[in-house]
Every structure is written in C-alpha cells, then in structure tokens.
Image (cartoon, helix red, strand yellow):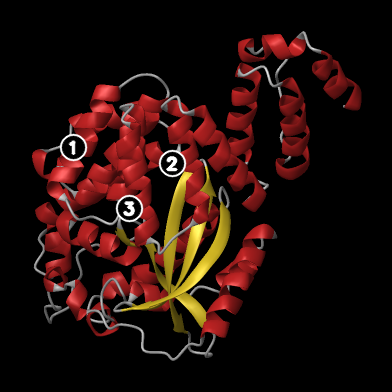
Amino acid sequence: MGVLLLPGCSKKKPEDLTKVTKADIAKPTAIISDEEVQQFAEDLEQALADRDAAAFRRLLHLDGMFYRIFPKTKVDQHSQLKDAQAGWKRAVETNIFGSLQSFRVEFLRVVRDADGIKARFRLAGEGINYWDVLLDRNAAGRVCMVDFLDYLAGEFVTDGQRRLMQQLMPALLSGGVNAAKGNAEMRRLKRIGELSAMIRQGRHAEFLQEYDRLDADLKQQRTLMYMRVMAANTVAVNGDGAGVYKQAVDAYRREHPTAVNLELMLIDYYFLGEKYDDAIKAVEGLSRRVSGDPYLDLLIGNAHYAAGDSAKANEILRKVIQAYPWEQAAYQTLVVMAAAAEEYETVTELLIAGEKGAGLQWEIEAAEEFAGYRDSAEYQKWKNRK
C-alpha cells in the first residue's frame, strides 16, 4: 500500500470507489503481435540482467496500471487519490524491479485469453513462481507492462490493491468520511504497512505473532492470509511451526478454494507433510496451469528422491541439468545421491559439472554424507584439479 488519502474539502461528493469491481476496469485493446511480445520479453530480461532500472522503467505503463485499480474517470474525482498517484508509481516501480532481482526470469510463451495479451515468465530462485505480464501500449505506442498476475499471490496485482484499499479504507474512498473514521482507517493502513515491512525484512515469526493480534476482519483479509502462509512456510522450513503452517494453508484453502496460487502453495504443503505423491500431483497441476514447463521436473525429481526412489530421481534430475545447466539444486541432489551410492567417479563428474554449469562452490570437507568420498582417490583427483 503506497497510497495515503486524507479527507478532502470538495463541495461535490466524489463517486464511491468502494463500489468499483474488476468488471468496471477496461481491458487492454491494443493490437500486439507475437514478435512484439517476444521483443518486450527480451528487453525485460536484458534490463534485469544489466540491473538497469532506467531501462526497466521504460517497460512499465504505470499510469495504465494505476487506472486498472480504479478507472481514470473515477480517480479524477478524488483529488487525494490523484495527488497520491505519483508516489504510488514510484513505489510500485521500485518494488517490481527489486522483487525480480532475486530471480532468474525467463520468458516462456505468449498467452492470449480473456484478460488480453500476456507474456508468461518463470521466476526461478529460492523457490519458483510465474508471472503473466499483461501488455498494452503507452501514449508513445510502446508495448509495456500494464499489470501482472503473480501466481504466488494468486491474482493480478491491481486486483489485490483495489480490494485492500476498499476493505481497509471504505470511509475515505466513499467520500463521506469524518475525522474519526478517517483517522481510524489511516491507523489500519499504517498497521498493514508495518506487517508488510516484517515480511520484506524476513521477520516472519514476528509477523505471525502480530497477525494473531489482529481484529477478526483483518485476519480474513486475503492479502494478509496469503502473507501469513508465506511467513508460516518460512518458519516451518527452518524446522519449527509445521502446525502453524498447516493451519495457515488450510484456512486459505477454505476461503479461496479455486485460487490461482493453490498449486504453488500445496507443493510446499505436501513436501513438508512428506506426502510426496500429492506433491507430484500438485506440480503436475501447476504444469497444466502454465501450459507446460519442463523445469518443473526439478520438483518432481526431488519428490521422488525424498520418497526414496533414487533411480527415478536420478533419471529425472539428469534431464533437468541437461536442459537447465545453471540449476544448482539439481546438481546438489544428484551429488548427494551419488555419494550415498558410493559412486565416487560420478560424484567427481557432478562436482565439476556443477562448478562449470552452475557456478557452485562446493563445501564437502566437513559434510557427513561425503565422508566415504573424502577417503577415496576421486576426492584427491577433484582436490588436485581445483
């Protein structure tokens, strides 16, 4: 939430923005070819690779994005919202660019559906995500991002912003606010900002404690429920709070049984619950949703490994490193399996391949699973090579 509204003094009561729904938002109508979508994708990937914020900014249609929250004709009636637009754009531009920096972003395909023309990207890093970037043309005719569907969040970013504002500041948006209501809503907005900062700063256990102190209506707010799942997931992965994570996911599933982000959410849910067949089904469901992505074999291979089927895991993960030689996680699992099977020549092969293909810096000198390898001639061969 980057928008702060204060009570205005307009004589004419502005239109009630709490009544605006997604159906009131005009869809992009620009004619954009597949070649133009692919060029946009190349430009976006290059801007991220170069860490070029200025080049990335030129790919954003931030005015168009703002008017997908509330239509321009309605925003113009709210002077405070209009005044806040510039600050909102700066915050969103920074947040989008920053959030993508921690991922390897790769264009997958052009998507044409009821929303409009989209470029689908895979985001690989600490976990996996997908973005469907909705495209339109800016005033200069350039193809730009006007919105994006974040698969982890389960919705377009503008839909989430609209709902959050409508639920947290109804008096301010309706135009009939008094000082007491306005101040109360501003305090709620400030509280949401503090909770969001906890997530960004990695203070996940603290977030969960503060979430439990929220009023009942805020606990049911979709964005906060999603943030609760993400915080609980991190706490559970670090070895504590599995029960809290299960509660968070189950609550989200009850409230949003058809959400776009369920497959991504359930993959971790089933892995942590050691239900590997269910995890594989969730991965397959995600693959269908994104119209196929061989990279997801990484998760399927890891599920087979966790389930004890090393032969199947090895077969799948070998294909992963052939297709995606930069994927460190696949090498790491394969090396551990080879060491456990005392296939030390294979261990050396994979150590070298991981260094070359994925830039891995192995630390095996003290790891218990490599004790046998360290006693072998292959270990000295690898050490001498280094």
Give the residue type that dot 3 points to.
Gly
- Any part of residue 248 in sight: yes
Give the residue type that dot 2 points to.
Arg
Point out residue 162 in the picture as x, y percentages from the top left corner.
Answer: 24, 64
Q: CA distance from mark 3 to mark 2?
A: 29 Å
Q: Quadrant of the C terminus?
A: top right
Q: Residue at x 22, y 80 (%)?
A: 74
Point out residue 337 in the picture as x, y percentages from the top left corner.
Answer: 59, 24
In the image, residue 285 above or below residue 365: below
Q: Quadrant of residue 330?
A: top right
Q: Secondary structure at mark 1?
A: helix
Assess disc 3: are there few (<14), some (14-19) or many (≥20) residues with their C-alpha within 10 Å of its C-alpha: some
Question: Which of 295/32 is in front?
Answer: 295
Assess disc 1: are there few (<14), some (14-19) or many (≥20) residues with their C-alpha within 10 Å of its C-alpha: some
- Any part of residue 194 in sight: no
Q: Which mark is residue 87?
A: none
Question: Which of 118/145 is in front?
Answer: 118
Q: Residue at x 47, y 49 (%)?
A: 296
Question: Which of 322/271 is in front?
Answer: 322
Please say if the residues under marks 3 and 2 sit with CB atoms less than 8 Å apart: no
Question: Which of 385/254 is in front?
Answer: 385
Give the residue type that dot 1 points to.
Asp
Q: CA distance from mark 3 to mark 1?
A: 18 Å
Q: Secondary structure at mark 2?
A: helix
Point out residue 315 in the picture as x, y percentages from the top left corner.
Answer: 56, 39
Q: CA distance from mark 1 to mark 2?
A: 24 Å
Residue ID for mark 2: 200
Residue ID for mark 1: 250
